[in-house]
Amino acid sequence: MQTLLKAALILGLSALTTVFAGEPLTLVGRTDLPSYSGDFDHFAADVRGKRLFLAGEDGGTLEVFDLQSGRHLTTVKGFEAPHAIHFMPESNRLIVTDSGEGMSKVLDGKTYRVLRAIKLTPGADVIGYDRSRARLWIVTGGKNAKVKLPYTVVHELDSASGKRVGQVRFETDFTESIAVEQQGARLFVNLSGKSEIAVLDKKTRKLIATWPIKEGQHNAPMALDEANRRLFVVTRKPFRLVVLDTETGASIARRFFAFQIGTST
């Protein structure tokens, strides 16, 4: 697992560098964490403060690195199973989702002290951010809850206060990434357990459409190119990149890919 952690940090740091069109990503650094063991989850960056945050899922920690050098700065303990991180530069605070019974947490970005818990449905996981309305969308429930649930709930929160303003329920125990239009009015939710994309009105939280992913199962990572009306979805079974037209939901391109970033022991 340490090999996987090294590779993920390499990819995380590389992705934050400027990549010119046509040039491949190149290795810019590597950080070893010999004391860490197990799985980990999402990254977040404090670009102005030059910090990179990593959710240590199995270790129950928040790992903090220097964004430029990659040097490990500190380990923040006190979590059960952290998954996603949202940094708020205007208040220097962090929201860290936690699928454990202690719930998600708001941290002071300077001291890393826990300021309060955000009480949502158990099993908090991924975060989507609507910058245009200062809203956070957090996936909860399903297979990540300690007592597993047959459904997931996506909560909408005010990002400044962390207070819940609404929610929408999906009848699947596996919901993954969220992509949000910043100019438009839609929200895309990856219903991985159903191999579908749910399209919502982000203001009313009403379902607009459901787009099937026919090229594979376990659709998980997702990215939106709003200007060019493209939604990029990666399936895990098989490993495939699928490109959807966000006007119609139609699949317009697909590609198999294979990669290896290390081996787990």
Image (spheres, rainbow, N blue to C red):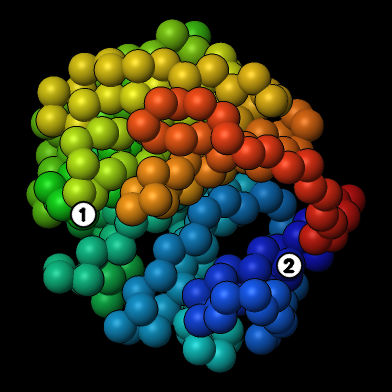
**75 horizontally vs 179: left or right:** right
- State the residue at coordinates (64%, 75%): 22
Q: Residues within 10 Å of mark 2 (few under 14, many from 20)?
A: some
The quadrant of the image that shows the N terminus is bottom right
Q: Which residue is mark 2?
A: 7
The residue mark sitting in front, 2 or 1, is: 1
Q: Relative to 153, does residue 233 appear above or below in the rendering?
A: below
Which numbered disc flags the more N-terminal residue, 2 or 1?
2
Q: Nearer the viewer, residue 217 or 119?
A: 217
Q: Which residue is mark 1?
A: 131
How far from the left and from the top, in percent, is residue 66? 49, 84
Task: Determine whether label 2 and label 1 are within 8 Å by CB.
Answer: no
C-alpha span from label 2 to label 1: 30 Å
The answer to whether any part of residue 200 appears in the image is yes
At label 2, the amino acid type is: Ala
Q: Relative to 112, does residue 161 appear above or below in the rendering?
A: above
Residue 210: image tag: none
Q: Relative to 167, does residue 181 appear above or below in the rendering?
A: below
Q: Quadrant of residue 208?
A: top left
How far from the left and from the top, in percent, is residue 214? 64, 20
The answer to whether any part of residue 128 appears in the image is no
At label 1, the amino acid type is: Arg
